[in-house]
Image: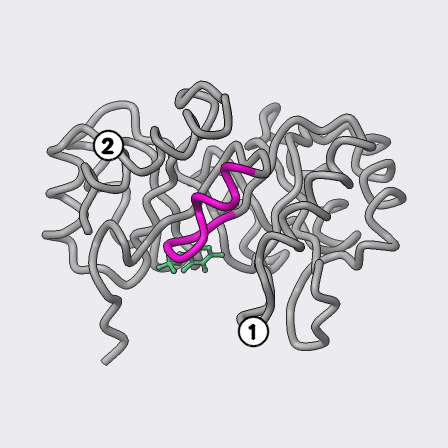
Amino acid sequence: MGLQEIEARLRNAADDAGRAPESVDLIAVSKVQPNERVEAVLRDGHRIFGENRVQEAAGKWPDFREQFEGISLHLIGPLQTNKARQAMDLFQAIHTVDRPKLANTLARLAQEIGACPDLFIQVNTGEEPQKAGILPADTDAFVAECRTLDLPLRGLMCIPPVDEEPSLHFALLAKMAARNGLAGLSMGMSGDFEQAIALGATHVRVGSAIFGERDYG
Ligand SMILES: *Cc1c(COP(=O)(O)O)cnc(C)c1O
């Protein structure tokens, strides 16, 4: 548990896969964590963080940014179109582009602002009705649509169903990214990031294994 241990495990997993450790970005998922824990990880020199709510991120990251340089913030939770502009100001990457309406809004705002965070399409690899994301069968068409909109599309993202073998979902996502010429793969969390690295993850999203359990109390 803790940043150093997770960094070491990440390096080992990359070595085992014959990959350079630098080819995997460790996103420290700080949602719901007390500020002291986040600050400790910042003091250890880590700079890539993930949040899943725009409001929560807006409440804590401007202060951290005044104290620490070079922070890269990734949105890994659902984005409502009415929060898109705020999200584009706050985040360097958005991993949850999950519907045409959001893609259109991001494209319009990118024109206005003259910049856009790196984007990942969330794919609902398990085809779970309650989960956000583009269905696998619709993904190629949606990638093409995002490209028509001139969006800076970097890759695909998935959250496997809790009760299924994650490797199957990671492999499926990697295959879809490859056939669409996308280099980015946002996959793997505390329980399965090593498997994700073995299957090509470029961004792993690790929360509780770095910070400890989240307290939603
Ligand atoms: C919370 C969250 C994570 C981190 O989960 P852990 O199991 O704590 O590592 C990763 N990805 C997404 C999309 C999340 O919402």
Q: SS class of the residue under badge 1? A: loop
Q: Residue at x 75, y 67 (%)?
A: 127
Q: Residue at x 82, y 48 (%)?
A: 139
Q: Residue furthest front?
A: 16
57 vs 5, nearest the viewer: 5
Alpha carbon distance from label 2 to label 1: 31 Å
Instruction: Say few, some or many: other residues with alpha carbon within 10 Å of mark 1 (under 14 / 14 to 19 / 20 or more).
Output: few
Residue 156 seen by the camera: yes
- Residue type highlighted by circle 2: His
The label on residue 39 is none
Label 2: how many residues lie within 10 Å, few (<14), some (14-19) or many (20+)? some
Q: How is the image coloured?
A: one colour
Mark 2 or mark 1: name the one nearer the start of the chain: 2
In this rendering, position of residue 61 left or right of residue 130: left
Q: Secondary structure at mark 2?
A: loop
Confirm whether residue 111 shows in the render: no
Residue 11 x, y percent position in the rendering: 34, 29
Give the image quarter of residue 135: bottom right
Percent across and percent down for residue 129 are 72, 76
* Point 39% across, 52% down: residue: 51
Say which quarter of the image contains residue 150: top right
200 in magenta: no
Q: Does 83 sit above or below residue 114?
A: below
- Please determine whether, in this image, residue 146 is positioned above or below residue 56: above
Residue 151 as seen in the image, left or right of residue 140: left
Quadrant location, ligand no. 1: bottom left
Question: What residue would you read off at disc 2?
Answer: 46
